[in-house]
Image (cartoon, grey):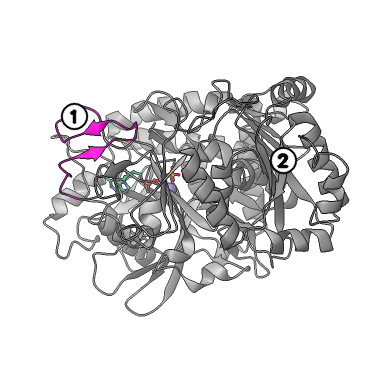
């Protein structure tokens, strides 16, 4: 034991990057793995690792005729979602973490973590995964190295990011800065101790050191907690890099919309977790002549281009999508990508012929399944077959409708930004902001009923600024100021138009006020026609909403009255909303930008006259 963890490590390592070697040695000394393995990202390696995971019982190989080269994983029932209560931003000063984050002094946290990680990889292999978020050929490529004792994490990171030898070689050649991202399941094995299918630890810590740009994640194998390139790096740490370097790291999809006149528009949209990003990114329009292509479904990095335009790229290489509700009826494009295989499913149900199923995948419910906890399941069962936060992990290259611009390091110029949440009441189907700053106000007060994507109660209303509440790596007021300051460097003529959307409003009878999914193309069409000066709108105190006849309803069984109901601004609901926004803004204290306080005051004045 430990032979590689000593001197030979330096000789056998496939890099001469001194900083990386020193960190790998330091971690090996702390965590005491049996072996150290440098991940090369090859197909052969992936086959070997997934074979081992099948032998260990962590992965179940699916029927290759249904899902080639695909696997299902079933987690510990206590490890199914992001753990926001246990997520920390450990900046030097508490003030810099802001009121939206958990904080502990870095020295104190480091001591705690050193205790937890001490010997935590005993009996296991320590994998070293070099990765890059975004393009390897970007002007300033964003490198990271994840050290993990989970082969499931290696196999999933291979789908979600560009990993392995090519990345490591570039890091070595340029002696590049990288984000050290340390992950351990926190489940060491004593000699002779049998492993379990999903090792993890009841004590979970997802910790970020923003000044150091480092990540320490302990105790969870679940995607958002363990695939550290994703939420931890590309959102929390990247948001801090973005603040310091003058760009934006956001929880947004990017799509390309082509009009019947063959004009292209690029649109990004920020919705909280499980509120429709992946679905909108892969939209199948129900209106003639309009086409959608995908660039990204979860994370967007934006910067001001040479001509003052706002440019967007997707730093990820895969989809880590919510399975339930993704179906042949609602999202055929995602289903086609998944059906090509090379995917890992987590906490879905298994069909008797070796495929997967989840609620909403097909209209017809299979007569018999094995549920995500391994129990026999029939439609009479009182529990869902798949966990509500079960996920598919699939290479983005498998999307037929992937826009070729996805591969361009320069990204695309945005024409519109949508902010949206899950609200049963109050928030209209779509509202165009009065101005850029008014749009930032809409983003800053974004609200949504909570979902199964994070541990905790479901259905509670919470404010979620720019859908970034769990992901802002610094003070939330500074974050809003940064939005204002970045856009201050843009050409005002080229700034995207901002819209607030809500696919989830209910009618008096409890049904959805809007059919959603592919029909959301009608809302995108209206938004584009607004910025082309072609569609009508009604001015309300909160912004511009469609007139009954300005939304294209061709082929839908809806009347103009339906639209008017879906976009109604209700005075009573908004009185309650304004009070709730007031309470929300009070939490920022001094750190709230004055421009947004003025927006709220102006909205109140307009509402009083309404
Ligand atoms: P994360 O990947 O967790 O960040 O979430 P996401 O924003 O990508 O959410 P996703 O697209 O996976 O949607 C999650 C849920 O929203 C699913 O249950 C969908 O069925 C539902 N949903 C998405 N779009 C619509 C819509 O237009 N209308 C309605 N009613 N439901 C929708
Ligand atoms: Mn997300
Ligand atoms: Mn998604």
Question: For residue 381: magenta?
Answer: yes
Measured Cα–Cα span from mark 1 to mark 2: 44 Å
**x 88%, y 50%: residue:** 18
**1 vs 2, front mark:** 2
Tag 1, which secondary structure?
loop
**x 62%, y 51%: residue:** 248
Q: In this view, does 277 lie to the left or right of 53?
A: left
From the viewer's side, name the closer residue of 419 and 350.
350
Whether label 1 touches label 2, CB < 8 Å: no
Tag 2, which secondary structure?
strand
Where on the picture, by quarter, is residue 263? bottom left
Where on the picture, by quarter, is residue 370? top left
Residue corresponding to mark 2: 35
From the viewer's side, name the closer residue of 570 and 145.
145
- Whether 364 is drawn above or below 2: the answer is below
Badge 2: residue crowd in 10 Å (few <14, some 14–19, many ≥20): some
Instruction: Name the dominant secondary structure of the magenta segment.
Output: loop
Residue corresponding to mark 1: 381
Question: For residue 345: magenta?
Answer: no
- Rendering coords of residue 296 (x, y %): 48, 58
């Amino acid at each position: 034991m430990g032979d590689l963890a000593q001197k030979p490590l330096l000789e056998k390592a496939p890099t001469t990057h001194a900083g990386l070697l020193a960190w790998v040695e330091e971690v090996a000394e702390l965590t005491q793995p049996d072996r150290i393995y440098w991940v090369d990202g090859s197909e052969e390696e992936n086959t070997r690792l997934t074979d081992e995971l099948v032998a260990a019982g962590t992965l179940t190989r699916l029927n290759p005729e249904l899902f080639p080269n695909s696997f299902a994983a079933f987690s510990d029932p206590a490890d199914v979602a992001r753990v926001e209560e246990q997520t920390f931003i450990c900046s030097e000063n508490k003030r810099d973490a802001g009121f939206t984050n958990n904080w502990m002094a870095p020295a104190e946290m480091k001591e705690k973590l050193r205790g937890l990680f001490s010997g935590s990889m005993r009996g296991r292999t320590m994998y070293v995964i070099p990765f890059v978020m975004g393009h390897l050929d970007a002007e300033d490529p964003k490198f990271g190295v994840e050290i993990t004792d989970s082969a499931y994490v290696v196999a999933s990171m291979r789908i979600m990011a560009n990993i392995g030898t090519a990345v490591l070689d570039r890091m070595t050649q340029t002696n590049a800065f990288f984000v050290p991202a340390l992950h351990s399941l926190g489940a060491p094995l004593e000699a002779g101790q049998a492993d379990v299918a999903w090792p993890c630890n009841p004590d979970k810590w997802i910790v970020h050191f923003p000044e150091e740009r480092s990540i320490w994640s302990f105790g969870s194998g679940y995607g958002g907690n363990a695939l550290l390139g994703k939420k931890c790096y590309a959102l929390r740490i990247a948001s801090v890099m973005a603040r310091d370097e003058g760009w934006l790291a956001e929880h947004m999809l990017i799509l390309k919309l082509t009009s019947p006149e063959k004009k292209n528009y690029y649109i990004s949209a920020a919705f909280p977790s499980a509120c429709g990003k992946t679905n909108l990114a892969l939209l199948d329009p129900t209106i003639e002549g309009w086409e959608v292509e995908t660039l990204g479904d979860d994370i967007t990095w934006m910067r001001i281009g040479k001509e003052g335009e706002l440019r967007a790229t997707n730093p990820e290489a895969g989809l880590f999508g919510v399975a339930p509700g993704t179906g042949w009826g609602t999202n055929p494009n995602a289903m086609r990508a998944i059906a090509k295989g090379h995917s890992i499913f987590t906490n879905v149900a298994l069909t008797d012929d070796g495929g997967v199923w989840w609620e909403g995948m097909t209209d017809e419910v299979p007569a018999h399944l094995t549920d995500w906890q391994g129990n026999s399941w029939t439609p009479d069962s009182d529990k869902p077959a798949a966990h509500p936060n079960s996920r598919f992990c699939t290479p983005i290259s498998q999307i037929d409708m992937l826009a070729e611009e996805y591969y361009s390091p320069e990204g695309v110029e945005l024409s519109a930004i949508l902010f949206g949440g899950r609200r049963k009441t109050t928030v209209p189907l779509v509202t165009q902001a009065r101005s850029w700053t008014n749009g930032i106000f809409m983003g800053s007060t974004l609200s949504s009923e909570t979902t199964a994507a994070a541990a905790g109660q479901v259905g509670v209303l919470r404010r979620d600024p720019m859908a970034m509440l769990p992901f802002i790596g610094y003070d939330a007021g500074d974050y809003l100021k940064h939005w204002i300051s970045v856009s201050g460097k843009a050409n005002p003529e080229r700034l995207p138009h901002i819209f607030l959307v809500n696919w989830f409003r209910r009618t008096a009878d409890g049904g959805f006020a809007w059919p959603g999914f592919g029909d959301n193309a009608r809302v995108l069409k209206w938004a584009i026609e607004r910025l082309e000066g072609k569609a009508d709108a009604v001015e309300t105190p909160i912004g511009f909403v469609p007139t009954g006849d300005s939304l294209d309803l061709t082929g839908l069984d809806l009347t103009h009255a339906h639209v008017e109901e879906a976009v109604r601004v209700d005075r009573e609901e908004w009185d309650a909303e304004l009070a709730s926004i007031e309470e929300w803004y009070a939490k920022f204290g001094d750190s709230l930008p004055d421009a947004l306080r003025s927006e709220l005051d102006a909205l109140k004045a307009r509402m009083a006259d309404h």
